[in-house]
Amino acid sequence: QVQLVESGGGSVQTGGSLRLSCQASGHDYLNYVMAWFRQVPGYKREAAAYLSGSGVAEYRNSVKGRFTISKDKARDTLFLEVNNLGPGDSAMYYCAADQARWVVPLWSSPSEYDSWGLGTQVTVSS
């Protein structure tokens, strides 16, 4: 059974940090493209960070310098280090993956990914 399970979310104050994890199982996801998206109720899901199959990272402008995406193949886990958090970062964070591609043409589009986790909530208070 292919599965992505996020963890590591929580409630922090402005300026705080978290480390989000996405445990993959049932498929060698870590060899292909993976990404972190986030969504606030009533708004579209937006891409936060992306990692190609070869390890090239991309970030949305608002998180550059604060978020770091990485993966540990031995542990089948994707990470997102989130630092200097602000209230605008509050959202449900989702792990996404494509089961077969090393790179996608539009990494920020949810339609590029065929596998999703259920999300982990990040809440930042001022």
Image: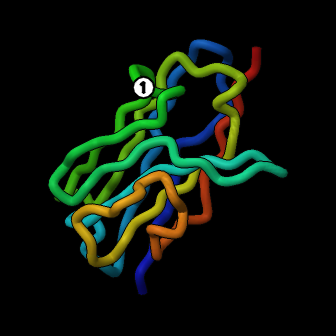
The residue lying furthest to the front in this view is 105
Out of 59 and 82, give the one closest to the viewer. 59
User: Where residue 111 sits in the image (x, y, percent)?
Assistant: 52, 69
- For residue 26, side relative to residue 63 (left or right): left
Out of 73 and 66, give the one closest to the viewer. 66
Q: Quadrant of the N terminus?
A: bottom left
User: Where residue 105 sits in the image (x, y, percent)?
Assistant: 35, 61
Q: Quadrant of the C terminus?
A: top right
Callout 1: 10 Å neighbours few (<14), some, many (20+)? few
User: Where residue 86 sits in the image (x, y, percent)?
Assistant: 65, 20
User: Label 1: which residue?
Assistant: 64
The residue lying furthest to the bottom in this view is 1
Q: Residue at x 60, y 57 (%)?
A: 119
Question: Disc count in the image?
Answer: 1
| Amino acid on which the number 1 mark rests in the picture | Lys
Q: Residue at x 64, y 36 (%)?
A: 10
Q: Residue at x 39, y 20 (%)?
A: 65
- For residue 103, side relative to residue 13 (left or right): left
Q: Residue at x 30, y 50 (%)?
A: 51
Q: Where is 33 relative to 124, above or below? A: below
User: Where residue 123 sits in the image (x, y, percent)?
Assistant: 71, 33
